[in-house]
C-alpha cells in the first residue's frame, strides 16, 4: 500500500516496546488492536505515540468495541477505525498519501 519504491517493515510489538521499534522522524503506520478491556491503556498509548512520533499514522483494529467506545476513539489521534479486516484495502489512499513525497501524485 506504499508508493514505489517504499516497502514497509512489519514489526509485531506490544505497547510497552513499540517505541523501541520505531525510528524517530520517519513516517510510520501503527496498527493497534483495541478490545474493550484495553481501551483505557490504548487511549494513553495513542496520546503518547502522537507526542513521541507525530509522523505516525495510527490505525485501530476494533476488537469488539461498542458504539460508545468507538465514538470515544474520535477524541484521540487515530486516523481510522477498522471493524473488519476486509476494510484494510479501502484505506490504501490514506497510506499512500501518508508516505508520498511532495512530487508524487496521489489519487
Image (cartoon, rainbow, N blue to C red):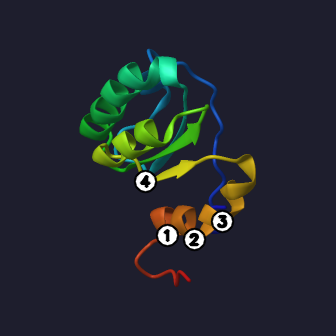
Measure the alpha-carbon separation of dots 4 and 3: 13 Å
Q: Could you say which disc has been placed on residue 79 in the image?
A: 4
| Disc 4 packing (10 Å; few <14; some 14–19; many ≥20) | few
Nearer the viewer's eye, disc 1 or disc 2?
A: 2
First in sequence, mark 3 or 1: give its number: 3
Instruction: Give the percent coordinates (x, y) of residue 39.
Output: 43, 25
Nearer the viewer's eye, disc 3 or disc 1?
A: 3
| Residue wearing tag 3 | 90
- Element type where label 4 sits in the image: loop
Q: Name the quarter where the N terminus is drawn.
A: bottom right
| Residue wearing tag 2 | 93
Q: Is residue 26 above or below residue 61?
A: below
Outermost residue on the right side: it is 86
Asked where in the image residue 23 lies, by quadrant, the reply is: top left
Measure the alpha-carbon separation of dots 3 and 1: 13 Å
Instruction: Give the percent coordinates (x, y) of residue 77.
Output: 32, 46
Measure the alpha-carbon separation of dots 1 and 2: 6 Å
Amino acid at each position: 500500500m506504499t508508493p514505489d519504491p517504499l516497502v514497509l517493515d512489519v514489526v509485531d510489538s506490544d505497547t510497552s516496546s513499540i517505541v523501541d521499534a520505531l525510528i524517530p522522524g520517519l513516517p510510520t503506520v501503527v496498527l493497534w488492536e483495541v478490545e474493550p478491556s484495553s481501551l483505557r491503556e490504548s487511549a494513553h498509548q495513542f496520546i503518547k505515540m502522537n507526542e513521541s512520533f507525530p509522523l505516525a499514522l495510527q490505525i485501530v483494529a476494533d476488537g469488539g468495541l461498542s458504539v460508545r467506545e468507538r465514538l470515544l476513539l474520535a477524541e484521540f489521534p487515530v486516523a481510522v477505525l477498522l471493524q473488519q479486516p476486509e476494510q484494510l484495502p479501502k484505506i490504501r489512499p490514506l497510506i499512500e498519501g501518508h508516505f508520498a513525497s511532495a512530487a508524487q501524485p496521489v489519487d
